[in-house]
Amino acid sequence: MAYKELSGDELYTSCRLQDDAFDSTAELEPMAQPPGQRRALEALQFGVDIKEPGFNLFALGASGVGKRALLMSVLNARADKDVELFDWCYISNFSNPQQPRLLKLTAGVGRELSKDMLQLVEDLLTALPTSFQEEDYRSRRQEIEDEVSETYEQDFRKLGEEAQNQGIALLRTPAGYTLAPTRDGAIVTPEEFAKLTEEERAEIEKKIADLQVELQRVVSQLPMMRRETAHRIKALNQEITRLTVEQFVALHCSRYEAHPEIIDYLGEVKEYAIENAEDFLPPDGETEVDHVKQRAKHFSAFQVNVLVDNKDVQGEPVVFEDNPTYQNLVGRVEYVSQMGTLLTDFTLIRAGALHRANGGYLIVDAANLLRHIYAWEGLKQSLKSGEIKITSLQEMLSLNSTISLQPESVPMQVKVVLVGEPWIYYLMDHYDPEFRQHFRVAADFSAETQASDENQLSFARMIASLVQDNNLQALDIEAVRRVIEQSARAAEDGEKLSLDLDRLTGLLQEANYWAKADGSELVRLQHVEKALDAAEDRHGKMRELMGEQILREIKLVATQGQQSGQVNGLSVLQLGQHSFGLPSRITATARLGRGKVIDIERESKLGGDIHSKGVLILSAYLANRYASEQPLPLSASLVFEQSYGGVDGDSATCAEVCALLSAITGIPIKQNLAVTGSMNQMGEVQAIGGVNEKIEGYFDLCDARGLTGDQGVIIPAANQVHLMLAKRVREAVAAGRFAIYTAGHVDDVMTLLSGVEAPEVEDQVKQRITELLDVQKSLEASGDEKD
């Protein structure tokens, strides 16, 4: 295919919306779903409808294409609005507090049960102390205490009488009981006792020793008697408590007759309250009012921990978890510090996103999920087991040295939707063999769509939707056309439209700002242009600095004259979402050698793999084209001059091969032309990316130095469809002050750069190869003679 010079009309694909299509976007019906997402939409609908295990969704697509918005529209349209939801509650396990029990209740019942249990505690805290203050209770308790005390006192009186009969007194002291001899009713003093005969002292000591044994027997019975007293009082307390507790519990049971699991729980609560009746009594010195207020909140065993309350949820729940840590997904058990000790109970169990989404949908950003340790494993384990088990991360890592709760697992019925870019999807699919078992539905979002007449009108309706959603002013048709053309530019293809809704929304908001600043009721063409120019200027600092280096000839790039072994290449620098083209000087040298082309970028570790591949391809092309039946007796070097950062990509391959051909033959290269394009081993020129930025980068340099009319850029013919050039470039081309050429083969590129036709270039290359072969043979012969 021969080269071709493009006219100004071939550098831009204009929007084809007809003038009578509409006057402003206010007339258009908003479009709920963006165009070009049929495949993704059908996948989402299928993934939502199918209820089989493992058919979870992965919405993959470039950032900004509206994955979440389309997903929500599908969920809102197809999610079951009449689904039966449940409250999930944890209650005390009175027999094993370390293993809290789970209650599955009809939505709304959990909240009511929790309130009723708090009310029950307050009622008992008020009623039970009153019951214990009644005269009947006091008299019966006093009777028990008096009965035991009387038995105890009788034993002491009996012992005292027996001691008295033996002339021994039983004395009660602050330290307890003691025995002492008497005479004539008076205590014998130590001095008097010492004056007694030895036989009298021995007799008295024997009596005291025998009585001491009996005294110890009587005293040793005191703990058992007190224990019996406590048991009898506790039984009395339970008897008094039972009637009160049964009355209040029965009142609540009547409200929950349709919930047998609650009835069973209330039965356990009743028995526990009766067994621990003393807990409801106020400590000494505390008023009844303070008792109720201060202690009601401490009866955790009677509380209901409503883990998930679905009373106010309509339809299947949809939960977005933006911070999908392990504990935020599966839940956690919290601790409180008391006196330096960490304590917990079932009321400190907290729900995770899977709990809140149970019965509906959980939407998680896949990249965020993979950033958190064990988050993916925790999610996968829940999907595999079909239940949510709250386990601490320390337990997962076998680092837990403290006893924690072991809550009963929650049965799970959740459709999980992961949202992420395609590389994350394929990465997970490649490295985790279980990934496909759980995420069988891939909703692949398109980053662009065909710029057909139908899609352009649909795109205008989508603009109307974004205007309405963001409360912006309507756009007139000229502004809409410019926005659509800018979307084609963003897609780097005049026949396609970018579906980057984030970027599109940003443009509409900026244009809306300039329209308001201008006092216009509509966003017009000049406001869109102003927004584009302002954004370009805000990000233009680096472009200006690097362009200034070339203009000041700090970085050498010629735009006039001729030079052998030197070609102007074009590259693109990407800084965030902003990119711009930058010309670079590519030079080549050729000399006698063994057929090796040295990539200086690669040798200096500044060249990427793709660039190195391009150099290998051009080496193979040279050998095959010009020395297919003989050795290639030359060595060559290629370099991007004044390049101090990494170089990658193969878009400079055409420029590099032309520089090499020029270096081999000595044919001068026109410096007023710049080249971009990759090539294959057959010499065919292949499409490259960033063609618009590359052309504009070289144009701006030539324009700054002064356009001469012979400057221009050579691009691959396949890139013509991608041209969406700025107005300044199109006007210069139309006026003949700048030229853009397309080429299909490297021969065409060399012809444009040198003015020499391909057959003549080939003859000169082969002639030079023959000359180098003769020199090589001569050197080899000279070396043989020396040997």
Image (cartoon, grey):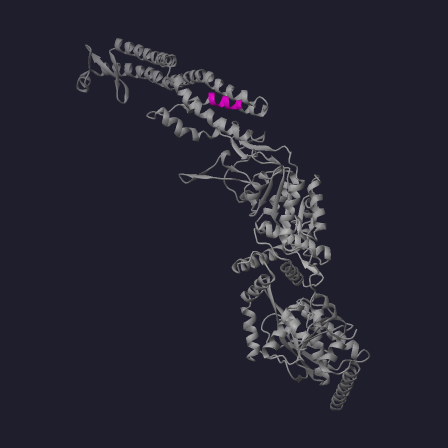
Residue 530 part of the magenta-drawn span: no
Residue 685, percent across and down?
Answer: 74, 71
Q: Nearer the viewer, residue 575 or 369?
A: 575
**Which residue sits at x=53%, y=45%?**
399
Query: Nearest the camera: 780 or 769?
Result: 769
- Residue 251 appears left or right of 185: right
Range of the magenta residues?
A: 266-274
The one of 234 and 536 positioned closer to us in this rendering: 536
The answer to which image quadrant residue 293 occupies is: top left
Residue 679 at least partly seen: no
**Up/down of 185 relative to 260, above or below:** above
Image location (x, y in percent) of residue 523 = 58, 58
Position above or below: 327 against 160? below
Location of residue 263 by image quarter: top right
Q: Provide residue 182's location: percent of width, then percent of height.
A: 21, 13
Q: Is residue 469 above or below residue 411?
A: below
Q: Residue furthest right?
A: 629
Does the image show residue 536? yes
If the image is split into quadrants, where does the C terminus sit?
bottom right
Q: Quadrant of residue 678?
A: bottom right
